[in-house]
Amino acid sequence: MGVGARTPLVGPQFADDLPSKAEIFEYWKGRLRGLGCRIDWAEPGCWACGFRYGTRYDVKGSQAGWDKVLRCWNSIPLQRCHIVARSLGGTNDISNLFLMCRECHDLAPNTSFPEIFFEWASAQSWDARESAKLSAAFDAFGVSGVALEDFAEV
């Protein structure tokens, strides 16, 4: 390789040997409700906070076949996240993978205890997180009281 040439990223740490999002969905579809996590087969979204990417990835038509449902789940930009992190001994097994938005993936706890992960995931709320961001922004600009009430009306 010449000067400035980049070494290609190869090796097991960079191999994409994770199951597809559709395979992860199929594995978890009947298991998530018992863990307190959100899932709607026809409206793919983050299993932790419930964030959805609008209707772009929704399953269209009440008569859509199972292959259409799986295609929608494969196409949504959710991240395949480890329940128990690889650095803590977690595997790429389908039972250790969870579909989340980027923000939840960034916030997820690094733990070797799946129970802690699922407790964290079930406590997430996209609406509450966005409300907290707006509140912090209003505070930063000194918007409060009557001005905040006026803004709420808009």
Image: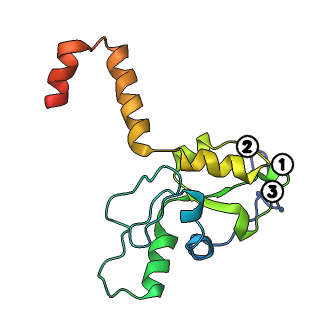
Determine which residue is flagged by label 1: 88
Determine which residue is flagged by label 3: 90
Whether residue 98 appears in this view of the structure is yes
- The spot of residue 89 in percent (x, y) is 85, 54
**Distance from the alpha carbon under mark 3 to that under mark 2:** 10 Å
- The spot of residue 19 in percent (x, y) is 67, 72
Q: Report the residue at 33% width, 65% height from top.
A: 56
Which quadrant, please, contains the N terminus?
bottom right
Q: Is residue 68 left or right of residue 82?
A: left
Is there a contact, CB below 8 Å, between mark 3 and mark 2?
A: no
Q: Report the residue at 60% width, 42% height from top.
A: 106
Q: Is residue 139 above or below residue 66?
A: above
Q: Residue furthest front?
A: 34
**Mark with earlier residue (2, 1):** 1
Is there a contact, CB below 8 Å, between mark 1 and mark 3?
A: yes
Q: Report the residue at 30% width, 11% height from top.
A: 142
Q: Report the residue at 48% width, 49% height from top.
A: 49
Q: Is residue 70 above or below residue 63?
A: above
Q: Identity of the amino acid at label 2?
A: Asn
Which quadrant, please, contains the C terminus?
top left
Pick whichever, 69 or 127, lies toward us. Answer: 127
- What is the secondary structure assignment of the residue under circle 2? loop
Pick whichever, 9 or 34, lies toward us. Answer: 34
Determine which residue is flagged by label 2: 110
Q: Identity of the amino acid at label 1?
A: Leu
Q: Identity of the amino acid at label 3?
A: Gly
**Distance from the alpha carbon under mark 1 to that under mark 3:** 6 Å
Is there a contact, CB below 8 Å, between mark 2 and mark 1?
A: yes
**Mark with earlier residue (3, 2):** 3
For disc 2, the neighbor class at 10 Å (few under 14, some 14 to 19, many from 20) is some
Q: Is residue 73 left or right of residue 139?
A: right
Display coloring: rainbow
